[in-house]
């Protein structure tokens, strides 16, 4: 089916109609510039079903809500490597960045190639995507990873890393400690010495992102 300008305009109008100023205010605190409830975006995506051409058109609008919808209706395996690289660099809104990595890149045949390229990228936001993909490998496919080397990099660079990169590196540190008992003591020691996110405000009932606490709690739950 050919995607017409009218079809795109209709979807954009529907997204505009879902806009809520209170949600926009909450999202703005996290760096996301849209005011549409994520559940309503998911419901719209469910109704539209998979439409790769429409996903391309929605992504091209540069609107955050439209890009989130595009991620949900696209075919993750249909993208070429360079397309995903460009899209990630365009995805400056944290939620778009997060969904693109988790819902699209992780399911794409070029995920590992992109992981390695992004880890070495000088842009800290792009590098954070490389670390997000590495977290997935640590948990599910650690066989060919050099975990001691990853810990070396985290120990050297995490303390002074910019926010989103630091968060991803810290998550990787915790994941190594949770999943790999042989590296747990070192992961906890690194977390204790660097004190990254030690004072991060945590809601009651939630686990602190401070790596030693996070590791201890997740290991306790697994027993």
Image (cartoon, rainbow, N blue to C red):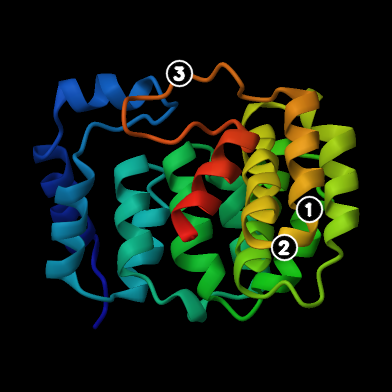
How packed is label 2: few (under 14 Cα within 10 Å), some, or many (20 or more)?
Answer: many
Q: Are marks 1 and 2 in contact (CB under 8 Å)?
A: yes
Residue at point 41%, 64% (across, down): 56
Q: Where the N terminus falls, by quadrant?
A: bottom left
Q: CA distance from mark 3 to mark 1?
A: 28 Å
Q: Which of pointers 3 and 1 indicates the residue nearer the eye? A: 3
Q: Are marks 2 and 3 in contact (CB under 8 Å)?
A: no
Question: Which percent across, then down, holds residue 144?
Answer: 82, 76
Q: Assign a secondary structure to mark 1.
A: helix
Res 19 label: none
How packed is label 3: few (under 14 Cα within 10 Å), some, or many (20 or more)?
Answer: few
Question: Which percent across, then down, holds residue 198?
Answer: 61, 21
Q: Assign a secondary structure to mark 2.
A: helix
Q: CA distance from mark 1 to mark 2?
A: 6 Å
Side (left or right) of 25 relative to 46: right
Question: Which percent across, then down, holds residue 73?
Answer: 30, 68
Front residue of 26/194: it is 194
18 in relation to 210, above or below:
below
Residue 11 visible in image: yes
Side (left or right) of 43 relative to 95: left
Task: Kindly identify which residue carries mark 1.
Answer: 119
Front residue of 12/73: it is 73
Task: Kindly identify which residue carries mark 2.
Answer: 115
Front residue of 29/50: it is 29
Q: Residue furthest front?
A: 223
Res 201 label: 3
Residue at point 36%, 74% (across, down): 52
54 in relation to 208, above or below:
below
Q: Disc 2 or 3, which lies upstream in sequence?
A: 2
């Amino acid at each position: 089916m050919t995607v017409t300008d009218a079809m795109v305009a209709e979807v954009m109008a529907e997204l505009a109609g879902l806009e809520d100023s209170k949600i926009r205010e909450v999202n703005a605190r996290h760096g996301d510039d849209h005011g549409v409830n994520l559940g309503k975006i998911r419901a719209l995506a469910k109704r539209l079903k998979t439409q790769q051409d429409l996903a391309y058109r929605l992504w091209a609008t540069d609107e955050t809500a439209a890009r989130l919808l595009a991620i949900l209706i696209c075919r993750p395996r249909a993208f070429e490597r360079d397309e995903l690289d460009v899209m990630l660099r365009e995805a400056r809104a944290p939620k778009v960045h997060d969904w693109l990595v988790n819902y699209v890149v992780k399911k794409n045949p070029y995920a590992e190639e992109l992981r390695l390229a992004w880890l070495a990228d000088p842009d800290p936001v792009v590098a954070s995507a490389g670390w997000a993909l590495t977290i997935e490998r640590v948990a599910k496919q650690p066989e060919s990873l050099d975990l001691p080397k990853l810990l070396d990099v985290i120990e050297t660079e995490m303390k002074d890393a910019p926010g989103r990169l630091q968060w991803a590196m810290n998550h990787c540190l915790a994941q190594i400690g949770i999943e790999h008992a042989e590296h747990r003591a070192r992961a906890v020691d690194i977390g204790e010495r660097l004190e990254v996110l030690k004072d991060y405000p945590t809601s009651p009932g939630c686990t602190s992102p401070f790596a030693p606490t996070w590791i201890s709690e997740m290991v306790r739950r697994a027993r």
